[in-house]
Amino acid sequence: MKIYITGIIGMLGYGIYQYLKDREEVDGFDIISVDIPDMSYHKISLFDMDAIERELVIGKADIVIHTAALVNVDECEKNPDAAKKLNTEVTRQLAEVCEKHKIKMVYISTDAVFDGNLLKLYTEEDETKPVNVYGKTKLEGEKFVLQNPSNLVLRTNIYGRNIQKKQSFGEWIYQSLCEGKELNMFMDIDFSPILVDELAELIYKLCQRNLSGLYHACGTGCITKYDFAVKLKEVFGISSGIIHKSTSDKVNLKAKRSKHMGMSNKKLCTELQVDISTPEESIEKFYGLMKERDIIGN
């Protein structure tokens, strides 16, 4: 397969590239310049869809994995036009290009499409009702992608290792605790995080099977932000820093958040016949990966 990744220098994009590079022919797009040995990609803006289309045709793309998005929830709320332009309009245009040239599109969506009012893990059949601009623009993107029954939409909530200066949720907790900071972590917000490395493997299996439609590609079960931080501190053996219990109503956030973002991955696990890590298990894997990459000592 010839696979193109949008946002290939982002956390998920690069994670997918790392997993696929020795298995398939991989290329991608990003506007950020990073010098990585033995890696090449096209420095093209997704707003230049004509250039994107040319490269996909020349490269004879079979699959496009669309990871690029404006994901900062508060930034989306402050700049709704920018969020709509990238998360919705670019997605629509890319879906049209892919359909035109019979290229399968894999769209990475989010748990922010739900309002958090259900007292259970959300399934693919549950009503979507986003409470912020980020969720609304990503949901609109989903609708355009799913107009083609051959395409694939994956709702998720990721963390892992960034090659850019940005930090994932897990990295931020680790770095903050190592620096001896005090963290106020929410007890009233839960989610179903999945490690980028595990998600990359799932995406590849889905592509190999040529599956389509909507799936929740997330961790098994859910965990509060507070409990996630406590578990990470324990697993990483960090003695510095303090984690305080807090609630989201004590913080003046620009965008409203869903308090319950836990999703069920049963549909995906059944289809692929796989087990996906719980949040606690994924933190153990995260620790192992950080050690392997010499981010932390033994």
Image (spheres, rainbow, N blue to C red):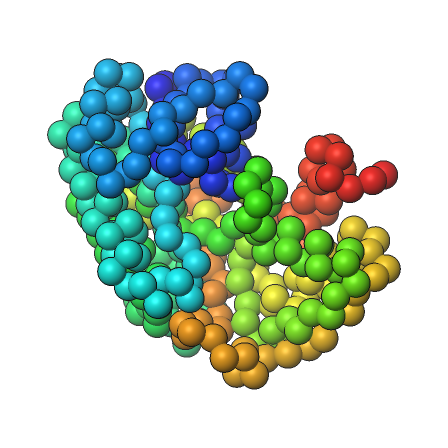
Residue at 47% over, 35% down:
9
- Residue 272 percent coordinates (x, y): 46, 37
Q: Tell me which corner region of the image, top left, top right, bottom left or bottom right, holds residue 129.
A: bottom left
Residue at 52% over, 26% down:
35
- Residue 278 percent coordinates (x, y): 62, 52
- Residue 210 percent coordinates (x, y): 33, 29
Of residues 64 and 75, which is closer to you in this image? 75
Of residues 31 and 127, which is closer to you in this image? 31
- Residue 179 percent coordinates (x, y): 77, 58
Residue at 83% over, 61% down:
240
Q: Quadrant of the N terminus?
A: top left
Q: Does residue 42 appear left or right of residue 11 in this picture? A: left
Q: Does residue 294 appear left or right of residue 144 in this picture? A: right
Q: Quadrant of the C terminus?
A: top right
Q: Residue furthest bottom?
A: 250
Q: Does residue 259 appear left or right of residue 134 in this picture? A: right
Q: Residue furthest left?
A: 100
Q: Tell me which corner region of the image, top left, top right, bottom left or bottom right, holds residue 225.
A: bottom right
Asked if 297 appears above or below 50 in the picture, the reply is: below
Residue at 29% over, 51% down:
87
Asked if 131 appears above or below 46 in the picture, the reply is: below
Of residues 151 and 57, which is closer to you in this image? 57
